[in-house]
Image (cartoon, grey):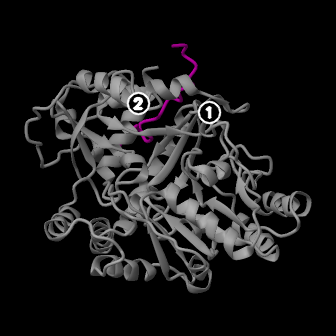
Amino acid sequence: MKRFITKRVLSSTNSLRSPRCFSQHAQKQTPLPENEIPVPKLPPFDYSPPPYTGPSAEEILAKRKEYLSPSLFHFFSKPLNVVDGKMQYLFDENGRRYLDGFGGIATVCCGHCHPDVVDAIVKQINRIQHSTVLYLNHAIADFAEALASKMPGNLKVVFFTNSGTEANELAMMIARLYTGCQDIISLRNAYHGNAAATMGATAQSVWKFNVIQSGVHHALNPDPYRGVFGSDGEKYAKDVQDIIDFGTTGHVAGFISEAIQGVGGIIELAPGYLPAAYGSVRKAGGLCISDEVQAGFGRTGNHFWGFETQGVVPDIVTMAKGIGNGIPLGAVVTTPEIAEVLTRRSYFNTFGGNPLCTAAGLAVLKVMEKENLQENALVVGSYLKKRLTELKDKYEIIGDVRGKGLMLGVELVTDRQQKTPAKAETLHVMEQMKELGVLIGKGGFYGNVFRITPPLCFTKEDADFLVDAMDYSISKM
């Protein structure tokens, strides 16, 4: 691979790692040449998985190719066969341990197989796995009450679904029913799902099939790194008003956005954007929908919900992923007045809110409070972002480091001025980090952004290992 990275020579007072970060084993090794980066070592962890006796990665891949959809893709040139997980670590078929810096796409919040969540699931499945909401069961009511207690304002009525796509589909339908309008405003670069309405709201061509997607307008993305107005949120928000004035009747059903775009490459909306955009939408009679599928449940650290970082209160909030720590579960939360629209006809979801999933969801909330995971996301996430920013100062290939808490993005570019996406280099570094024992995701329209969304039980030692692995991998290109 072409060597284009600019390295800055560090003085002894600005070393790659402080002495406390080195393992005792590393300190006893023969001194490395000046500026040579040591191979990072996984932090110690007191768990070994039982021996795996199932099919090999090659056998599984062959079955996938024959029996599963050809649309499925995988990371890495040699796909990883994950057979075990414990807290922030995953294990392959050979028992090798990996630091999970992706969290199943921002889904595992408490940690893999957290004992409290597992215990709640086992206890529930031993009593009753599924019935129907046509009968009473305390699990769904208990979880709805607990979830409503985490919401601001009068957001207290919960509809349970099985996924984020389902939640966003329902939210958009509710907005259209409540207002009597069809027009929805979304953001460019957004991802909200892959069903009929949500594919329309999604605004990246790679996720959009050639099917009818009507009634959605896409506003300028308030992207502080690549956007035309930098970090001026109010200037971006003027485009929402222009869409209302020139693209609709002057009335809209609603506006949907993520507070931090996940699939889009961990894009934080420019400061001041949501208050201004919400103001325009509400003047036009529309409802404001916050998609918290990835940014919710304490992941941003400083707040429980992503929308709180911009000081707004939506009319509808959607969520999934972290809500169940990996259990298929989603939800829509809104006000009693807005929720009333679904009584106009019969609305029903067979699996939404089943006892097993809602018991797991309640256990997740309890673990988050008991273990202060939101606070941990803030403390460890801030430390991790600081260390990643230090890497940006060292390597020209890192164009931007962004995000909040444990929802962070690192964008690679071959030219900082032109912001030319370094797509091939991103894949290469991911591969090398995997070989060192670190798993991270990627995203962004150009596929050149590392998505770092680990379980919220991540430690500073884990953060050091992740950054050291990235440092080592980039230095060897």
- Tell me the residue that label 1 is attached to: 446
Tell me the crowding category of disc 1: few under 14, some 14 to 19, or many 20 or more residues within 10 angstroms, Cα based: some
- Measured as percent of width and height from the top left, residue 34 is found at 38, 24
Which secondary structure lies at badge 2? loop
Q: Is residue 394 left or right of residue 245?
A: left
The x, y position of residue 107, in whole percent, is 39, 54
Residue 308, by quadrant, is bottom right
Q: Amino acid at mark 2?
A: His
Our reading of the magenta stretch's main secondary structure is: loop
Q: Which residue is mark 2?
A: 74
Which label lies toward us, 2 or 1? 2
| Magenta stretch holds residue 389 | no
Disc 2 or 1, which lies upstream in sequence?
2
Q: Nearer the viewer, residue 23 or 428?
A: 428
Q: Which residues are magenta?
A: 1-17
* Residue at image point 31% right, 25% down: 61
Q: Amino acid at mark 1?
A: Tyr
